[in-house]
Image (cartoon, grey):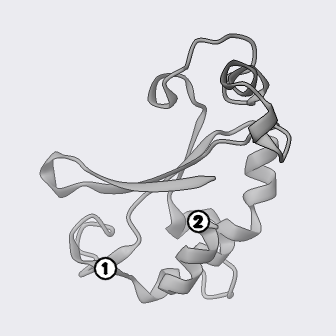
Amino acid sequence: MTQCKMINWRYSINKIICYAKISTVAENSSTISKSESIIKSSFYPTTNIRRKWWKESIAYQIYPRSFQDSNGDGIGDIRGIIQRLDHIKNLGVDLIWICPVFKSANDDNGYDISDYQNIMDVFGTMEDVDELIK
């Protein structure tokens, strides 16, 4: 399951944090006790102690503008991130931290967000973000 949260920091720095818990539990979870599912989960590999994702996860921060250009315009974009997800997963990453991609006047490299509900045109579309989250 992938979950995304927008975290608002002081000084109007806004980030999207996406994290996925990858489970190795069998599909029929009704036959597995709660403690077994905790042990078999990749996020809780060896103990019954529930780890805190914000303390123990491996994060990979992405600055989209310079990460991967998928359409040849010289600016990285959401589709470029999607193209590299397998590589990021192979690094053992638990979550990706994406620098702002929202609509912006771009006076402060995208941190001066003007519309929190739309994606800046150079980075792609909201449909691209939906695909990234899936």
Quarter-wise, where is residue 67 in the image?
bottom right
Callout 2: 10 Å neighbours few (<14), some, many (20+)?
A: some
Quick check: 101 above or below 33? Answer: below
Residue 117 image label? 1
| Amino acid at the residue labelled 2 | Ile
Quick check: 38 above or below 112? Answer: above
What residue is shown at x 60% (from left), y 32% (from top)? 58
Give coordinates of residue 133: x percent, y percent.
Answer: 58, 65
Q: Residue furthest front?
A: 31
Q: Residue furthest left?
A: 11
Residue 60 image label? none
Q: Nearer the viewer, residue 32 or 122?
A: 32
Query: What residue would you read off at disc 2?
Result: 133
| Amino acid at the residue labelled 1 | Gln
Q: Nearer the viewer, residue 48 or 100?
A: 48
Q: Nearer the viewer, residue 106 or 23?
A: 23
What residue is shown at x 54% (from left), y 20% (from top)? 51
